Amino acid sequence: MHRRLDPVFRSIRKMASSGAEPQVLVQYLVLRKDLSQAPLSWPAGALVAQACHAATAALHVHREHPHTAAYLRDLGRMRKVVLEASDEPTLQELAETLRQRDIDHVLWLEQPENTATCLALRPYPKEEVSQVLKKFRLFR
């Protein structure tokens, strides 16, 4: 049986075989850790859904940006890093810092509660945003 290779993956294979190393783009997400702990105790699936909503929204809102377009063209090399914020005020503070520094992002608000649950940046080269995110550790 012959499987047809999607054009996106053909271009990935072609880039890999040519030795050309594309710029590494990373989409960072910052998810509230307190949502997984008592008294809130959200199930893992609900937390994953919040991160998925935020990531998808950021990609959609910033789809015209060249970094986002490049990230979506190279599906086999997508990189995401999920960091944790201790609580909602910490997440809101990060959103404000990103706004002040003109760093593109989406703050996901769970409805109907209008509660900030996750923040997602559009894809960026790691070195462009690492300073502002350095105080956040990997989500566990």
Image (cartoon, rainbow, N blue to C red):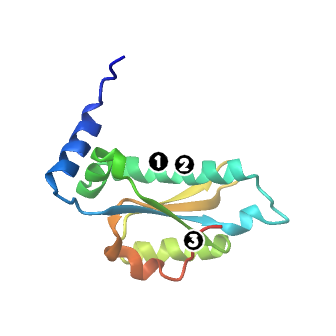
Residue 106 image position (x, y, % from top left): 47, 59
Disc 1 crowd rating (10 Å Cα; few below 14, some 14-19, many 20+) is some
Instruction: In the displayed orientation, state which residue is furthest to the front.
Output: 1
What SS does tag 1 mark? helix
Residue 51's place in the image compared with 103, above or below, is above
Q: Which amino acid is tagged 3?
A: Leu
Q: Identify the residue at horizontal 60%, vertical 55% (top origin).
A: 109
Mark 3 and 2 residues: CB-CB less than 8 Å, in contact? no
Foreground of the two, 40 or 93: 40
Residue 5 image position (x, y, % from top left): 29, 29
Q: Identify the residue at horizontal 62%, vertical 61% (top origin).
A: 116
Say which residue label 3 marks.
Answer: 138
Residue 56's disc number? 1
Say which residue label 2 marks.
Answer: 53
Q: Which amino acid is tagged 1?
A: Thr
**Residue mark closest to the camera, 3 vs 2:** 3
Whole-number angstrom distance, CA of label 2 to CA of label 1: 5 Å
Residue 39 image position (x, y, % from top left): 85, 65
Q: Identify the residue at horizontal 24%, vertical 37% (top origin).
A: 10
Quarter of the rendering occupied by the N terminus: top left
